[in-house]
Image: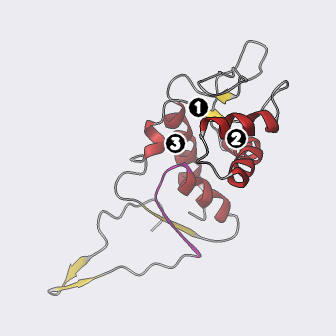
């Protein structure tokens, strides 16, 4: 089935609906950055099938404009990022969850870069980090005003070329 798209899961055969049989080690539902990122990591351990509601790039990630928040350079720190997030969350954030997300953001950004995502860079080669509302430091990795589409482009390219997906 590699390289093909199923447009429906049921086929009419002799008046009865049947479903194709597929075997995978992992089933991923959804093709946004979370689904495709997981698929790429899972594909290192086994075979992966991705199920989407439509075209592979028809997901929220593809329409995201802003950027990825990550502690990247000094003077930014995890502590500052956590504090900014908790302040903006106005008491609605789980502090432990915020800490986990903030401390894992650099590794997630590194994965995206390794998979081919391009983020805007300065002339000296460093990342052109932006500072947006609620942030006390420049920590927003972005690609023009199309960050989500760029992330989705890179992930789809990797998924389509992976032999286990």
**Residue at point 54% right, 76% down?**
24
Q: Nearer the viewer, mark 2 or mark 1?
A: 1
Q: Are marks 3 and 1 in contact (CB under 8 Å)?
A: no
Q: Which residue is mark 2?
A: 109
Check the image and name the residue furthest to the right.
Answer: 74
Q: Is residue 10 left or right of residue 37?
A: left
Residue 4: percent from the left, percent from the top? 40, 61
Q: Categorize mark 1 by other alpha carbons within 10 Å: few (<14), some (14-19), many (20+).
A: many
Residue 145: percent from the left, percent from the top? 51, 24
Separation (CA) of disc 2 from disc 1: 11 Å
Q: Categorize mark 3 by other alpha carbons within 10 Å: few (<14), some (14-19), many (20+).
A: many
Q: Is residue 20 left or right of residue 88?
A: left
Q: Nearer the viewer, residue 111 or 132?
A: 132
**Residue at point 60% right, 23% down?**
132
Q: Which residue is mark 3?
A: 152
Check the image and name the residue furthest to the left.
Answer: 15
Q: Nearer the viewer, residue 35 or 103?
A: 103
**Residue at point 65% right, 71% down?**
46
Locate the C terminus by quadrant.
Answer: bottom right
Separation (CA) of disc 3 from disc 2: 13 Å
């Amino acid at each position: 089935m590699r390289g093909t798209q199923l447009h429906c899961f049921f086929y009419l055969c002799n008046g009865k609906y049947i479903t194709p049989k597929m075997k995978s080690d992992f089933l991923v539902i959804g093709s946004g950055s979370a689904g495709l990122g997981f698929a790429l990591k899972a594909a290192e351990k086994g075979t992966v099938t991705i199920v989407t509601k439509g075209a592979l790039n028809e997901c929220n990630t593809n329409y995201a404009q802003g950027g990825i928040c990550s502690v990247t350079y000094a003077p930014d720190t995890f502590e500052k990022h956590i504090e900014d997030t908790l302040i903006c969350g106005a008491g609605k954030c789980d502090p432990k969850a915020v800490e986990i997300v903030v401390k894992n953001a650099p590794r997630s950004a590194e994965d995206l870069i390794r998979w081919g995502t391009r983020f805007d860079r300065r002339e000296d080669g460093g990342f052109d980090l932006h500072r947006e509302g609620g942030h006390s430091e420049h920590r927003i990795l972005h690609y023009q005003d199309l960050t989500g589409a760029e992330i989705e482009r890179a992930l789809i390219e990797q998924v389509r070329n992976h032999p286990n997906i």
